Amino acid sequence: MGNALGTSDRPLRVAIVGSGPSGFYAAESLLTAAIKVKVDMFDRLPTPFGLVRYGVAPDHPKIKNVVKVYEKIAAHESFSFFGNVSVGQDISVGDLKKFYDAVIFACGAGTDKPLGVPGEHLPGSHTATEFVAWYNGHPDYRDRKFDLSGKVAVVIGQGNVSMDVSRILCKSVDELRNTDIAKHALKALAESKIKEVHLIGRRGPVQAAFTPPEIKEFVELKECDPILDPQYLNINPESQAELADPNSTIRARNWEILKEIAACSPANNPKRFVIHFLKSPVVLLGEKKLEKVVLEKNELTGPAGKQTARGTGIKEELACGILFRSVGYRGVPIPGVPFHEQKGIIANLDGRVVDNEKVVPGLYAVGWIKRGPSGVIGTNKADSAATVERLLADVPNLEACQHPDTQAVSDFFKTKKVRVVSFNDWQKIDAAEIERGKALGKPREKFIRVEEMLGVLEEN
Ligand code: NAP
């Protein structure tokens, strides 16, 4: 190896920007590589685990158990956590390159795709990102206000995020009380007057992006009736072919659950979850705030497997007090890193960052910022491993960094007066949150402000 990177004397030094699933899986692949690697992971918040902490719904605790795997990775002697450090703000990518031979961006997709219809930004129309981050206690979203005083909420999009948003609105407070939902969100939801949640999909039941466990949960809600007009189950021949495709068991399982919902007579529960297919919002209307959404009925066009929605010109109005746009996420650019605007990801070729199709040496991407917002948490394991494989193949040609020294990194932040949060520090915050939760019968009561988190460290 020309540059001798990856030996005990000179381990390969890699910075990972972002501490969600894709970041941890990249760390795992690096730390189990045949060469010696030192991994430093950065997160702009003092807390690790990204999407697992701030994206996964509070009533899905089993999914969050995956952090036990990440804790094991973090315990590796060659792993360090640099929390409370914003790359691009506290340290530039250029400076990062002085301390690391390679940088992997694992910073996820931090914002939503726009809907692109007039009235989208009326008060009362929100992105799913805001709502999800708010009920999960993300410090940046803690102070958001959601007016839950109306009777009707509308959710646009039919992916699993829209299912999370709808379910949180449809559940009774008793069904949420013992989760790690943020206290402010539980209080607001306890006062919610919402009785109807309308889920709007632009295509048909066979094309819905949600998965069977997520739709099944609506059949099991304690105080909410799922409603589906059986007419939606009269599908065109192309959709029938998609449904019969033996490679897509998800569609067939969704179909069975949707049939069950359509056949059910409502049990007169206080809330209703109404599923609509083949409708797109065309305009959101209201004087000072959202009052109604105009929906256009669609028909499907194109061959099986590639059907798209086409407006029919037939419109209907749905009065609503609040609306959530949940039509997919997109990444946010990092200063100094080439970005593919149209796709909303870091410009990359199989994980190697590219600028005008030319590889930028030493920069890599994993997870949603590499491929876009698709797949479940586990999808990131193979995705991150694939990028790390390319990085390891590039090692002989990497330019060794100028200051291969973690102490130099710490000194850099000391000079800049950045209070770096180590993994050990995080474990103190974690323990304090768990302790706070005990009294409330919750797995934890999250700190919702960075200052509160740092305050725990001053006390200890
Ligand atoms: P998604 O699965 O891509 O779903 C996006 C939805 O928005 C689709 O129904 C899509 O319809 C619709 N849509 C897109 N553009 C639209 C437009 N202009 N007008 C109307 N509808 C539009 O995205 P997501 O729900 O944000 O989820 C992201 C990823 O996280 C997914 O892989 C998801 O499975 C995963 N996730 C998993 C869980 C879980 O496992 N419990 C929970 C949350 C998220 P078309 O199909 O017609 O494009």
Image (cartoon, rainbow, N blue to C red):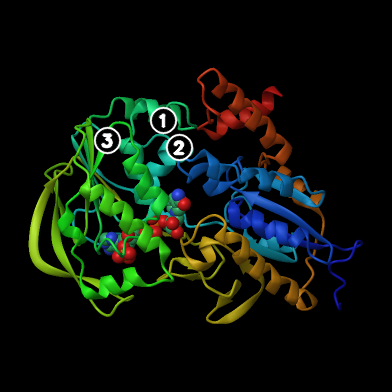
Which residue has dot 1 on it?
Answer: 176
How far apart are the two marked residues, 1 and 3, measured between alpha carbons? 14 Å
**Which label sits on residue 300?**
none
Which residue has dot 3 on it?
Answer: 224
Q: Amino acid at mark 1?
A: Leu
For mark 1, give the secondary structure. Answer: helix
First-in-chain label (2 vs 3)? 2
- Left-right relation of 203 to 173: left
Quadrant of the rendered image containing residue 235: bottom left
First-in-chain label (2 vs 1)? 2
Residue 158 lies, with reference to residue 84, above or below; the image says: below
Q: Amino acid at mark 3?
A: Cys
**Which label sits on residue 59?**
2
For mark 3, give the secondary structure. Answer: strand
* Percent coordinates x, y for residue 320 in the rendering: 17, 42
Residue 160 lies, with reference to residue 420, above or below; the image says: below
Q: Amino acid at mark 2?
A: Asp
